[in-house]
Image: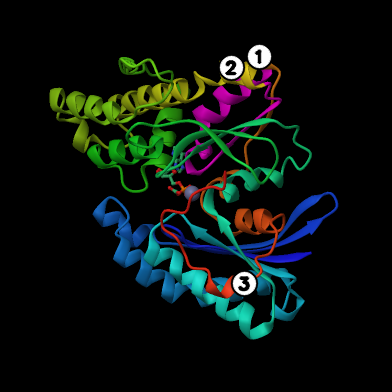
């Protein structure tokens, strides 16, 4: 089955051709237009600008994915597109374009939940993953832990109470004037600190929750970083090659990694999980990838983290998820939904 997967829920406009085979999904092409240069000066995604840019990018991105794969529209068995959640103006670009193409060419069409997409990004590397799986989805908008019984179901176990883990990276980079998005540059600084044998800054204190309920909180980290910069204002202008900036990034990355992974062993035992999936932009993080590898080995879990280009938002994950979903009887009445819920 040949699927065209489309994604534009935030600031990445992406299309991919995925071939679903008996052995799992095969990536035939992946096209993506970044909007980092547009949003960078604002230090975060500006929804109106993202929506407008997607409209300009969507046709070329689809054409590029088809051309790279050597596939014509009439060869497609299905078009899969992110239906939500996300920024509604952004979602509508690929959502509307895909419906128009599918209707015009008589191609079966299916809407996909963005988080099912992130889960299915792991299917490219681990098509035979043993279930149940713990699924940690970490990005600029999500820090959610799910239990999955297969590739199309996610049952929420816990989530952040405030900021997403990606925001801790983005806001730290912003305060240190390191650019946008923050994850890759903070990661590079942290790695440089480790390689250079430089000292980490003081560790960050993990949050405590009075109600004792399992969850995460990352908003305290940005306050923590802010206070450290207030105490040492030089950091804000010192740049990515400064040892103290690198030490601070290392401490931040170690805190995020440790906090994210902490609940996993107990929950894995409680739910009889056989595997751990980590996906979403923050799953690109080197510290998290290394920490998760150690944890998985210790706990006897099969670990599946997509290759970095499939961790961040992309059309391939939507194509891989869309290949497994039942087609809707009446797709043309469906609309994008910025607050789309997972089916229970
Ligand atoms: O999944 P994604 O592309 O978009 C959302 O759905 O949010 O994730 C983007 C997030 C940003 O916060 C970015 O800073 C973070 O992923 N990110 C990283 C790394 N690469 C991207 N965070 C930590 N380390 C990285 N290497
Ligand atoms: Zn995402």
Magenta-drawn stretch contains 292: yes
- Residue receiving disc 1: 298
Structural distance between the alpha carbons of marks 3 and 2: 43 Å
Contact between marks 2 and 1 (CB within 8 A): the answer is yes
Mark 2 burial class by Cα count in 10 Å: few <14, some 14-19, many 20+: some
Q: Position of residue 298 (x, y in %)?
A: 66, 14
Q: Position of residue 166 (x, y in %)?
A: 40, 39
Query: Closer to the observer: label 3 or label 2?
Result: 3
Q: Which mark is residue 330?
A: 3
Mark 1 burial class by Cα count in 10 Å: few <14, some 14-19, many 20+: few
Q: Position of residue 323 (x, y in %)?
A: 71, 58
Q: Say how many tags the image has.
A: 3
- Residue receiving disc 2: 265
Q: Position of residue 215 (x, y in %)?
A: 41, 25
Ligand 1 is within 8 Å of the C-beta of the residue at disc 1: no
Q: Secondary structure at mark 3?
A: loop
Q: Quadrant of ligand 1?
A: top left
Q: Secondary structure at mark 1?
A: helix
- Which residues, given as a range, are shown in magenta? 272-298
Magenta-drawn stretch contains 320: no
Q: Viewed as shown, does residue 209 lie left or right of 338? A: left
Structural distance between the alpha carbons of marks 3 and 1: 48 Å
Q: Residue furthest bottom?
A: 104
């Amino acid at each position: 089955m040949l699927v065209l997967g489309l994604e534009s829920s935030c600031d990445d406009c992406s299309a991919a051709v995925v071939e679903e085979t008996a052995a799992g999904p095969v990536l035939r092409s992946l096209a993506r237009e970044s909007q980092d240069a547009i949003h960078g000066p604002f230090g975060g995604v500006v929804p109106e600008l993202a929506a407008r840019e997607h409209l300009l990018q969507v046709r070329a991105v689809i054409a590029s994915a088809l051309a790279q794969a050597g596939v014509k529209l009439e060869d497609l068995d299905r078009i899969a597109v992110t239906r939500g959640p996300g920024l509604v103006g952004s979602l509508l670009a690929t959502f509307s374009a895909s419906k128009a193409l599918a209707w015009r060419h008589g191609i079966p069409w299916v809407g996909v939940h963005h988080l099912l997409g992130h889960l299915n990004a792991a299917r490219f590397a681990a098509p035979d993953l043993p279930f149940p799986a713990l699924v940690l989805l970490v990005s600029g908008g999500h820090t959610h832990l799910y239990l999955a019984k297969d590739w199309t179901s996610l049952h929420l176990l816990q989530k952040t109470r405030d900021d997403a883990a990606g925001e801790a990276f983005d806001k730290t980079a912003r305060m240190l004037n390191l650019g946008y998005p923050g994850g890759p540059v903070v990661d590079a600084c942290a790695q440089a600190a480790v390689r250079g044998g430089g000292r980490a800054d003081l560790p960050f204190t993990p949050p405590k929750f009075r109600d004792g309920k399992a969850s995460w909180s990352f908003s305290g980290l940005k306050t923590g970083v802010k206070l450290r910069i207030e105490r040492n204002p030089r950091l804000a202008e010192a740049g990515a090659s400064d040892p103290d900036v690198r030490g601070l990034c290392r401490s931040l990355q170690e805190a995020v990694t440790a906090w994210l992974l902490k609940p996993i062993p107990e929950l894995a035992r409680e739910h009889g999980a056989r595997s751990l999936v980590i996906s979403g932009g923050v799953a690109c993080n080197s510290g998290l990838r290394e920490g998760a590898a150690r944890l998985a080995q210790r706990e006897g879990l099969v670990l599946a983290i997509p290759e970095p280009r499939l961790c961040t938002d992309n059309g391939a994950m939507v194509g891989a998820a869309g290949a497994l979903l039942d087609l809707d009887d009446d797709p043309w009445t469906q609309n994008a939904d910025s607050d789309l819920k997972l089916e229970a």
